[in-house]
Image (tube, helix red, strand yellow):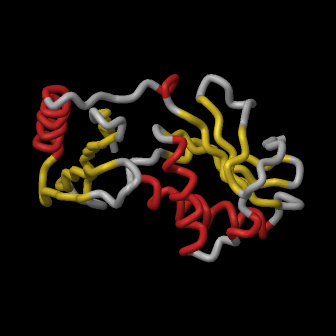
Amino acid sequence: MAIIRTFRRNDDGSLDFREAWYESYEDDTLGQFVVNHGAVGHTSTTKDVKDVDEETGASLLAAFEAQCAEDGYAEIPVEQQFWAIAQWPAKTAGAYAERLRDTAVQVLTGHLAWRGLGTIERTSFGTGTLNLHILTPDAKKVVPALKAAVREHDLDLAKLRIGVAPYSEPTVLKQKHPSPPKPFSID
C-alpha cells in the first residue's frame, strides 16, 4: 500500500496535513481509496471511496498528489523532522517487554497517524529500556499526543519517558516528559 503524506505550513506557523492511500480488499481485485486530512495534532477527517480497482486507485492517487502540489502541500524532508522517543523501563527483552512493545506500537501508530504526527520507524531495547523511535513533523505537539494515548490505553504514563531530538542529531535527545528534565539515552 503506497501512501502519499503531505504538509503545508500556514502563516501562523501551524501545520496542516493531507494523506491518501489505496488499499486492496483481502482476496479481491477491488479496494478503497482513502483521504485523511486536518490540522497536525488534532483528530483528522477521513473520506473514502469504496470498491475501486487498482488502476482507478492509482489515478486517484496521482490526482490527489497534483491537487496537493497546487494547494501548496508537499512532503517534509526527513532532515526537517524530529525524532521522538517513547521509552519505558524493561529489565529484559522477555514476554512482558514484547507485549508492551506490541501494544504500544498498535496504540501509538493509530493515535499519531490520525493526527498527522508521524510514524513509528522502529523499536529497540536498550539497557533496561524499551524504545519506540517516532519520526514526527512537530516536536512540540507529539509529546502531549503521546501522553494522551498512553493515558487513554493504560500503558503506564508514570513510567513513560519522552525524549526529542532533531532528525540529524538523534543522540542529542532532550527529555520532554516527565519534568524536571534528566539525561536521556536509548542505550
Residue 66's x, y, as percent? 14, 28
* Coordinates of residue 39 in the picture (x, y in percent): 31, 49
Occupied quadrant, residue 121: top right
Residue situated in front as seen by the camera: 58 or 89: 89
Q: Is residue 119 left or right of residue 15?
A: right
Q: In this rendering, would 102 be left or right of 30?
A: right
Q: Position of residue 93 (x, y in %)?
A: 82, 58
Height in image: 41 above or below 6?
A: below
Q: Is residue 73 left or right of residue 131?
A: left
Foreground residue among 140 and 81: 140
Q: How many marks?
A: 0
Classify 76 as above or below 173: above
Q: Work out whether residue 6 can be spotted.
A: no
Q: In the picture provided, is 161 more to the left or to the right than 76?
A: right
Quadrant location of the N terminus in the rendered image: top left
Q: Nearer the viewer, residue 134 or 52?
A: 134
Work out whether residue 3 can be spotted: yes
- Tell me the residue at 10%/42% (across/down): 56
Q: Quadrant of residue 101?
A: bottom right
Q: Residue 128: x and y, percent?
A: 87, 54
Which residue occupies 57% across, 44% down? 134
Residue lying farthest to the front in this orientation = 12
- Image quarter where the C terminus lies is top right
* Residue for point 34% across, 60% down: 43
Q: Is residue 127 above or below residue 100?
A: above
Query: Residue at the spot x=19%, y=27% of the render?
Result: 69
